[in-house]
Image (cartoon, rainbow, N blue to C red):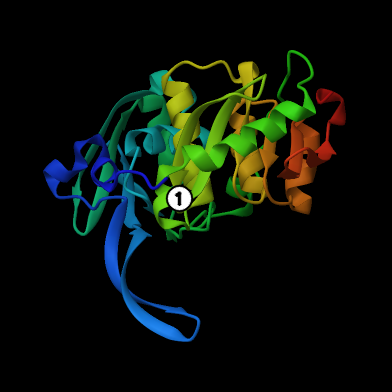
Amino acid sequence: MKPDLDQLRHPLGLHQLGYAAPLLEHAATRWEGGQATPSREVVAEEVPVAIAYNGLAHVVMMATPSDLEDFGLGFSLTEELVRTRADVRSIEAVRYSRGIELQLTVSEACEAEIQARNRRLTGRTGCGICGAGSVESVLRPVRRVEAPGPVAASAVGRALQQLPQLQPLNSAAGAVHAAAWADREGNVALVREDVGRHNALDKLIGALAGAGTDPADGFIVVTSRASFEMVQKATVFGVPLLAAISGATGLAIRVAEEAGLTLAGFVRGDRLTVYTRPDRLR
């Protein structure tokens, strides 16, 4: 069933400041059976989202204009620009030219680290590390993760099977990734969507961190491949298992192995491929 577009046009009250909605309609032409017919298509929006800390611009990311407070917190945590949720004192979304600026106030202790790692380029929709100034800032020290015990392999498949019904933006327009949090039985409790897979994961982690969720209480599933940036973000949060609907890259596997993260890919129904720490699944 198609979602109610009126409920999706202006999340978080951003329409009050004239921001773009996550979905819009556009005139198009459909070809089917050799016949062309005019149509109105629902498409996913992406806008420049500038992130600034204590008044200093850091990076511009292309993102879906929804759940942006979650995005600001999640990005700050997974990029290790702040240490904990407590380091972020406030987050405000304001109008920024033709996009949105997230203005974060952070502790002075974090400000020096942020200045040292200031990015130089726009982060494209499909890029999680665009603008990073050095190899060292990309390949950061790996954080070890711990798990309370094994999770049933069937729970992983169950979580990904639930996702299509929990992605209103993608159901309406396609072209939108999702990252979801599931409990250890595979019940999806929280989903975040974005045209960028890294952004969707940052939004999810931001929402989880803001709610004080213990990362050991569940696992994360994503509707994309498992690149090393996705693995790195998951390990920073401390989640013990990351499962992707597509495959994993070689560097992602090496980072997951070093971190002790269980990494699974090609999760389709009751089938999945486990690349690291298979002992965490039963």
Residue at the image position 53 percent from the left and 49 percent from the top: 197
Specify whether 217 is left or right of 274: left
Specify whether 211 is left or right of 38: right
- Residue 255 vs 107, above or below: the answer is below
User: What is the quadrant of the N terminus in the image?
Assistant: top left
User: What is the quadrant of the C terminus in the image?
Assistant: top right
- The location of residue 196, given as percent across then percent down, is 48, 52
- The location of residue 83, given as percent across then percent down, is 49, 25
* Residue closer to the observer: 149 or 139: 149
Residue at the image position 86 percent from the left and 31 percent from the top: 278
* Residue closer to the observer: 18 or 169: 169
Residue at the image position 59 percent from the left and 37 percent from the top: 233
Counting the numbered discs, the total is 1
* Residue closer to the observer: 5 or 16: 5
> As shown in the figure, which amino acid type bears the numbered disc 1?
Asn
Is residue 30 in view from this perspective? Answer: yes
Disc 1, SS: helix
Q: Residue furthest top?
A: 148
Residue at the image position 24 percent from the left and 39 percent from the top: 93
Q: Quadrant of residue 26?
A: bottom left
- The location of residue 228, given as percent across then percent down, is 67, 47
- The location of residue 54, given as percent across then percent down, is 28, 35
- Residue 188 vs 134, above or below: the answer is above
Which residue in the protein does label 1 denote? Answer: 170
- Residue 90 vs 127, above or below: the answer is above
Q: Residue furthest bottom?
A: 34
Is residue 113 in view from this perspective? Answer: no
Specify whether 39 is left or right of 185: left
